[in-house]
Image (cartoon, grey):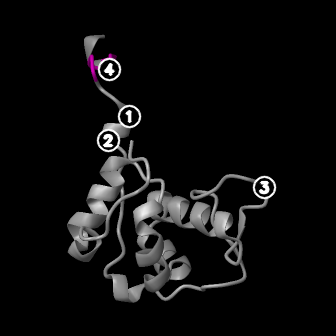
Amino acid sequence: MSEDLVQRGWRYSDHVPYSTPPSLTSLRGPTSGVIRVPHHINTAPQATYDLDDAADLWAAYSAIVRDGHPEDHIAFLNREVLLRLWPDLNLPRRCREAWTSAFPELRVLPVRALVV
């Protein structure tokens, strides 16, 4: 019975797996227009983002970096846009650490967003 209990101090956020693309140069996604993302990124009935709208662009990149798989990163993210938005993206600390560990060039960009 005691094996079924969650240990004190255990937090789900400490165990979320975050993935990264194979390289930042592989990120050649669209830079404008409307995109529809898979439900593991956004569960809304119309999971779309208008990349020409600054707020939608920020929300899309935050969600895709955080919840996307490598194939999603490649399909939807653009390297130049990611580098421009990186300091302001709303990402959990562990997600940001996973990406900066994989891509040292992201470490030099000053983070302005709230990191939880």
Marks 1 and 2: CB-CB under 8 Å?
yes
Assess whether mark 4 and mark 1 are in contact (beta carbons under 8 angstroms).
no
Residue type at mark 4 is Val
Q: Is residue 43 magenta?
A: no
Residue behind mark 1: 12
Q: Secondary structure at mark 4?
A: loop
Left or right of 59 in this view: 69 = left
Secondary structure, mark 2, is loop
Query: Tag 1: residue type?
Result: Tyr
Mark identifier at residue 45: 3
Q: Residue at x 40, y 64 (%)?
A: 87
Q: Quadrant of the C terminus?
A: top left
| Residue at 30%, 65% in the rendered image | 99
At mark 3, the secondary structure is loop
- Image position, residue 21 (x, y; %): 36, 75
- Whole-angstrom CA distance, mark 4 to mark 2, is 13 Å
Residue at mark 1 to residue at mark 2: CA–CA distance: 5 Å
**Mark 1 and mark 4: Cα distance apart in space:** 10 Å
Q: Which residues are magenta?
A: 4-9
Please name the residue that numbered disc 4 is placed on.
6
| Residue at the (34%, 30%) spot, across then down | 11
